[in-house]
């Protein structure tokens, strides 16, 4: 569940070191590790999980009593008071009128919801499920990023070999063009035929440029997934993909699907959504049940109008209280019934979402499985086709040199050979890619 989203400081450091070396060629593993450490979407998912964790703590804290202290300090003024307090000192009578007075109150209050139909406890469980779903969202994103990186990486590998084949074809075309120029000088070839050979050379050169342009485009997409935005050169390591890799045994479809069904985060996320819906129904139904709360408080007050001291007032005015509050819902304008019905509808929606995710998962696995088998068979056929077309072209080239074959036959043979070579490369790398993706859905690490 947590595979692909655990980011450690050493990983970030090593990725940063790799970027510091412009000659570094990135392996598939390095690309994936760097993306998991630096992808912005994954970072946002991590923040969402942290937020969900805070919601869980808040929901659990709501199970505990609350305690608060309050005080009020006020000054009063009575402008029209005429009578005051008389005092006698040394035989002299003095009268004071206190038009301004001061009051103070102090209270410590506590409350605790003892029972509310288990709403508070179910809310805590709901928050825990939301936190788990946030983590699964990160895992889904990480898996998606790894798949995209693998697809781009293999496309670059394929195009690298395609460029090599096109360059070989270009060199052959140049030799044919040079041979044609010599034949034209001795009158064995027309200018029109030589022009066709020149066109073939130009086309091969165009194919090289186009393939290299596609490589640059895929590298750019790969850099974007890795969140590399500078203009530093970026290149990948080109491992020697063997024919044996393309012809490796393909795991059974049912085995891959059953394993994916038990381990893929999108399925686990949908299952948690159903649990959340069940809790939401229970919370909504609790609206029909009574709520029992305990309250308690301590308080005292003082005033400047009293003749006693401040400390004495605090003591004599002290009071304590405790109480039980029972709230019984009678009529709530159908709010509870509506909440229950909507929660039930949401559960049905979650059940349908799970079925849809299971169907999508099977479709994806089946697609990879079919592509792996199809491309493996294509590769086997392409191996034979390349050998056959190579022999045929070698014979055509020799016959053309002797004047036994014309320019059209030579160009057709060369085109057939080039197509066979490209088909072989494409089927080889697509077979390898889809096999790796099947292993990935079985919980294994991607690697070429």
Image (cartoon, helix red, strand yellow):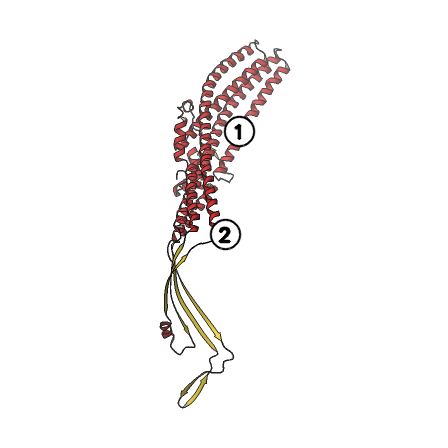
Where is 428 relative to 444, above or below? above
Q: In the rendered view of the protein, which quadrant contains the N terminus? A: top left
Classify residue 297 by image quadrant.
bottom left
Residue lying farthest to the right in this orientation = 191
Residue 90 placed where, x, y %? 39, 89
Q: In the rendered view of the protein, which quadrant contains the C terminus? A: top left
Chain-order first, disc 1 or disc 2 = 1
Secondary structure of the residue carrying numbered label 1:
helix
Residue 292 placed where, x, y %? 39, 56
Secondary structure of the residue carrying numbered label 2:
loop
Q: Which residue is mark 1?
A: 212
Q: Nearer the viewer, residue 138 or 273?
A: 273
Residue 148 placed where, x, y %? 47, 34
Query: Which residue appears at 47% of the width and 77% of the height?
Result: 100
| Disc 1 packing (10 Å; few <14; some 14–19; many ≥20) | some
* Distance between the alpha carbons at the discs numbered 1 and 2: 69 Å
Where is 255 relative to 71, above or below? above
Q: Nearer the viewer, residue 384 or 392?
A: 384
Where is 246 relative to 412, above or below? below
Residue lying farthest to the front in this orientation = 330
Q: Do the numbered discs 1 and 2 sit on residues whose CB atoms are within 8 Å?
A: no
Q: Is residue 408 visible?
A: yes
Q: Is residue 446 visible?
A: no
- Numbered-mark total: 2
Residue lying farthest to the bottom in this orientation = 91
């Amino acid at each position: 569940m947590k595979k692909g989203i655990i980011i450690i400081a050493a990983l970030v450091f090593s990725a940063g070191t790799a970027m510091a070396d412009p000659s570094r060629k990135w392996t598939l593993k390095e690309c994936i590790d760097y993306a998991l450490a630096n992808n912005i979407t994954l970072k946002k998912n991590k923040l969402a999980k942290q937020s969900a964790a805070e919601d869980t703590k808040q929901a659990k804290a709501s199970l505990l009593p609350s305690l608060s202290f309050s005080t009020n300090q006020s000054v009063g003024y009575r402008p029209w008071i005429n009578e005051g307090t008389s005092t006698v000192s040394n035989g002299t009578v003095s009268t004071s009128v206190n038009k301004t007075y001061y009051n103070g109150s102090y209270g410590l209050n506590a409350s605790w919801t003892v029972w509310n139909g288990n709403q508070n406890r179910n809310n805590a469980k709901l928050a825990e499920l939301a936190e788990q779903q946030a983590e699964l969202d990160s895992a889904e994103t990480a898996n998606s990023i790894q798949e995209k990186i693998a697809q781009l990486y293999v496309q670059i590998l394929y195009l690298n070999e395609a460029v090599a084949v096109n360059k070989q074809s270009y060199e052959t075309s140049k030799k044919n063009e040079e041979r044609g120029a010599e034949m034209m000088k001795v009158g064995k070839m027309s200018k029109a035929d030589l022009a066709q050979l020149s066109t073939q050379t130009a086309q091969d050169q165009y194919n090289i440029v186009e393939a290299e342009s596609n490589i640059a485009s895929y590298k750019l997409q790969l850099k974007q997934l890795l969140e590399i935005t500078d203009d530093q050169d970026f290149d990948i390591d080109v491992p020697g993909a063997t024919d044996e890799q393309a012809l490796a045994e393909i795991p059974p479809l049912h085995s891959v699907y059953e394993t994916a069904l038990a381990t893929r985060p999108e399925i686990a996320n949908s299952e948690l959504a159903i649990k959340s819906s069940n809790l939401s129904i229970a919370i909504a139904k609790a609206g029909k049940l009574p709520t029992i709360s305990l309250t308690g408080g301590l308080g005292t007050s003082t005033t400047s109008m009293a003749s006693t001291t401040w400390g004495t007032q605090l003591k004599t005015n002290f009071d304590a209280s405790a109480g039980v509050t029972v709230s019984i819902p009678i009529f709530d304008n159908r709010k509870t019934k509506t909440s229950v019905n909507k929660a039930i509808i949401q559960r049905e929606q979650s059940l349908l979402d799970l079925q849809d995710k299971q169907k999508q998962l099977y479709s994806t696995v089946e697609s990879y499985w079919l592509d792996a088998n199809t491309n493996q068979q294509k590769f086997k056929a392409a191996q034979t086709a390349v050998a056959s077309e190579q022999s045929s072209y070698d014979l055509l080239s020799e016959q053309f040199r002797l004047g036994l074959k014309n320019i059209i036959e030579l160009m057709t043979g060369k085109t057939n050979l080039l197509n066979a070579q490209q088909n072989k490369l494409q089927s080889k790398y697509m077979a390898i890619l889809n096999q790796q993706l099947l292993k990935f859905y079985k919980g294994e690490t991607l690697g070429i």
